[in-house]
Image (tube, grey):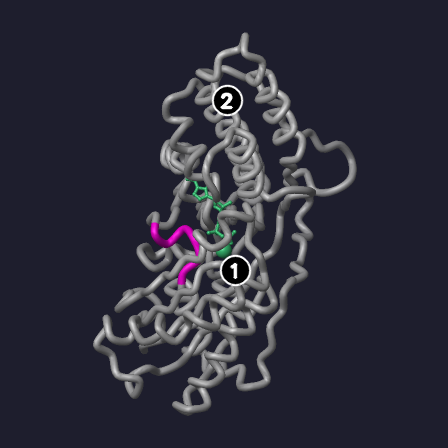
Amino acid sequence: MTVLGIESSCDECSLALVQDGKKILSQVIATQISHHEKYQGVVPELASRLHTEWILPVYRECLENSGVEPESIDGIAVTNRPGLTGSLLVGLSFAKGLALGWNKPLVGVDHILAHLYAPQLEFDIPYPFLGLLVSGGHSLVVLARDVDDMEVLGTTIDDAVGEAFDKVAKHLGLGYPGGKYIDQLAQKGNPEAYLFPKPNFHGKGSSMDVSYSGLKTAVAHQRERFRNPKVSEAGLPDLAASFQKTAVDILLAKLKKAVKATGIKTVVAGGGVAANSYLRRSLEEWKGVKTYYPRLDLCGDNGAMIAGLGYHLLRRGEDHGLHLMVESRVVRPRSPLPL
Ligand code: KG4
Ligand code: ZN
């Protein structure tokens, strides 16, 4: 079964053709980063306009590279939630046009579940597993029971971890989006140089929730000290390495709790921050737990993960039809497990 996947929820316009939920026949990822860079964040109006301009050429390139004819495409999968409304609408409208023109089934895919599907494009990971979804907009620890069935064990009460990486990078005067620049700078620094605070939750809320605003502020205060000419700028790599270690250790501690609470010994990471080298190394070194993360080009937003997950829905005979709508936000069920 060959599925066309369409992703346009944020600032990547990506289409991919995937066979049987596994084999990527072709994929094009057009990133808008250079257009949003000067604003240090994604401008929703600009994002949807660019998707409108780019989606047709991206589609053409994807099909040409694959050599696949539209007649041999069995179905269309499109991100319809969550994301920026205008951007989602461009992808969905395009998908509906193809579904109508080709008379093929159309399924809407949850972007977050698709990030957790990304490693399945390369590995066969049995369900249930514990998922760590870390991106610019989300920091979730989840229990994934199936490709489209998950419960939230923990989430952020303020900033997402990727957002914290981006804001700290801005304070350090690095590029946008800052995660990869912090990662690079941290290679030259000492992660034990600064002891930054980790959030502590008492009473209310899930013990698996995370918080990043305190850490972000602590790093910003420390950075201010370097502006004093008596203190050397040479300390920046140490600052980046210590921040990165703290940010990732917060997530690892929650995952360890989740393994203990559920007895599930398979952990799958996904999302842009899953590209972080310290996170990947820590997952690899975790003894007694089987860990997975996507290859680097599948950590960020991409059409292949949408086509891959969509295949399972289409195979079940699902067709969401032309009434499918976008949902910019999704309310996710919290696990009833005593955590
Ligand atoms: O999943 P994604 O591409 O987009 C969404 O937010 O949905 O994630 C982007 C985030 C950004 O915050 C970026 O700084 C972060 O992923 N990121 C990283 C690394 N590469 C990208 N964070 C830490 N280390 C990295 N190597
Ligand atoms: Zn994403």
Going by the numbered disc 2, the residue's amino acid type is: Leu
Nearest to the observer: residue 130 or residue 251: 251
How many labels, in total? 2
> x%, y% of residue 81?
57, 66
Nearest to the observer: residue 312 or residue 9: 9
> x%, y% of residue 54?
41, 70
Q: Which residue is mark 1?
A: 10
Sequence-first disc among 1 and 2: 1
Nearest to the observer: residue 74 or residue 217: 217
Give me the residue at 58% from left, 61% from top. Answer: 44
> x%, y% of residue 75?
39, 81
User: Which portion, as a residue range, is magenta?
Assistant: 297-302
Classify residue 207 as left or right of residue 107: right
Give me the residue at 46% from left, 25% from top. Answer: 241
**Marks 1/2: CA–CA distance:** 30 Å
* Dot 1 and dot 2 residues touching (CB under 8 Å): no
Report helix, strand or loop for mark 1. Answer: loop
Say above or below: 38 vs 53: above
> x%, y% of residue 145?
52, 59
Say above or below: 153 vs 210: below
Which image quadrant: the N terminus?
A: bottom left
Say above or below: 105 vs 289: below
Residue at mark 1: C-beta within 8 A of ligand 1: yes
Q: Residues within 10 Å of mark 2 (few under 14, many from 20)?
A: many
- Residue 239 is labelled as 2
Residue at mark 2: C-beta within 8 A of ligand 1: no
